[in-house]
Image (cartoon, rainbow, N blue to C red):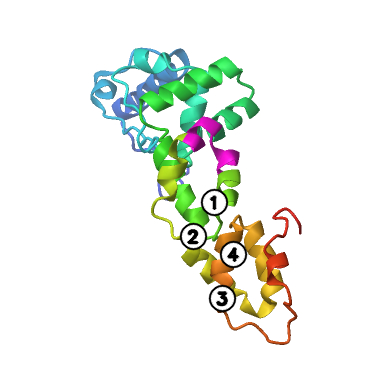
């Protein structure tokens, strides 16, 4: 009988007990994977890390249990997601919810809940937007009112409009706008400031004593200040 010398194959020296144990473990794992059997004590004690939840709305409500969360309507959930991306007025929020297919009643109910929770702050948003329009874009009172109607309900604008204008120096803003475009000439500036929503008196005061080009003909300045604000 001829014996072949060489290294034994892997597993040849395994004892029968080790081989049977390995077979039993494999069989047990397959059984649990296929049949959903009861987990072992080791599996019960094992702590499985839970993924971190994304941060919710900055000021979103914290429900104490799942039952309270289920009470939230689909329209309200959609409103929360919209507010998560930025501040919205009632009008802006209503328009976005209507575009998503919610009925008028559902939209109003969702908006009322957001208002009661303090997520929609009409006054603060209107005051902030008014300051932006006046001090950054140099809009006058008439133009500001028109722009506010695009983002807020009429009753909201009428309620807070006077308060929003209290700290705005329109004469200073009109003067700055005129100085920025001084080279365009007086005729252009009269029409430009009128389109921005300034009154004839504000336009006159803003352009008074500015060093315009003497070559420009302004024989009758009174006619310039009677221009139609809507004329381009």
The residue to which callout 3 is attached is: 179
Q: Which residue is mark 4?
A: 203
Q: Which residue is mark 2?
A: 170
Residue at 46% across, 30% down? 80
Q: Residue at x 55, y 43 (%)?
A: 148
Circle 4: element type? helix
In front of the other: 172 or 80? 172
Q: Residue at x 66, y 57 (%)?
A: 195
Q: Nearer the viewer, mark 1 or mark 4?
A: 4
Q: Is residue 156 magenta?
A: yes
Mark 1 or mark 3: which comes first in sequence? Answer: 1
- Which segment is the magenta one? 148-158
Which of marks 4 and 2 precedes in the sequence? 2
**Residue 79: where, in percent of width, then height?**
50, 28
Labels 4, 3: front one: 4
Position of residue 184 relative to residue 25, above or below, is: below
Q: Is the residue marked by circle 1 packed among few (<14), some (14-19), or many (20+) residues within 10 Å?
A: many
Q: Say which residue label 1 marks.
A: 141
The picture places residue 83, in percent across and down from the top left corner, at 47, 36
The secondary element bearing badge 1 is classed as helix
Between residues 113 and 201, which one lies in front from this camera angle?
201
Magenta stretch, main secondary structure class: helix
On screen, 94 above or below 125? above
Q: How many marks?
A: 4
- Mark-to-mark CA distance, 2 and 4: 10 Å
The reply to whether residue 164 is visible in this rendering is yes
């Amino acid at each position: 009988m001829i014996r072949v010398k060489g290294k034994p194959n892997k597993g040849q020296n395994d004892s029968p007990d080790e081989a049977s144990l390995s077979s039993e473990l494999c069989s047990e794992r397959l059984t649990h994977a296929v049949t959903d059997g009861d987990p072992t004590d080791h599996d019960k004690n094992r702590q499985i890390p839970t993924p971190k939840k994304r941060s919710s709305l900055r000021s979103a409500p914290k429900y104490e249990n799942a039952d309270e969360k289920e009470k939230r309507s689909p329209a309200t959930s959609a409103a929360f997601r919209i507010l998560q991306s930025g501040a919205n007025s009632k009008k802006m929020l209503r328009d976005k919810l209507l575009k998503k297919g919610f009925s008028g009643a559902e939209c109003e109910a969702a908006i009322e809940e957001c208002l009661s929770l303090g997520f929609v702050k009409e006054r603060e948003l209107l005051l902030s937007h008014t300051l932006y329009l006046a001090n950054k874009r140099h809009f006058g009172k008439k133009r500001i009112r028109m722009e506010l109607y695009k983002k807020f309900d009429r009753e909201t604008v009428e309620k807070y409009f006077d308060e929003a204008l209290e700290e705005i120096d329109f004469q200073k803003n009109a003067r700055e706008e005129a100085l920025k475009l001084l080279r365009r000439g007086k005729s252009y500036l009269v029409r430009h400031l009128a389109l921005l929503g300034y009154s004839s008196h504000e336009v006159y005061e803003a352009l008074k004593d500015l060093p315009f080009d003497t070559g420009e003909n302004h024989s009758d300045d009174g006619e310039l200040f009677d221009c139609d604000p809507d004329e381009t």
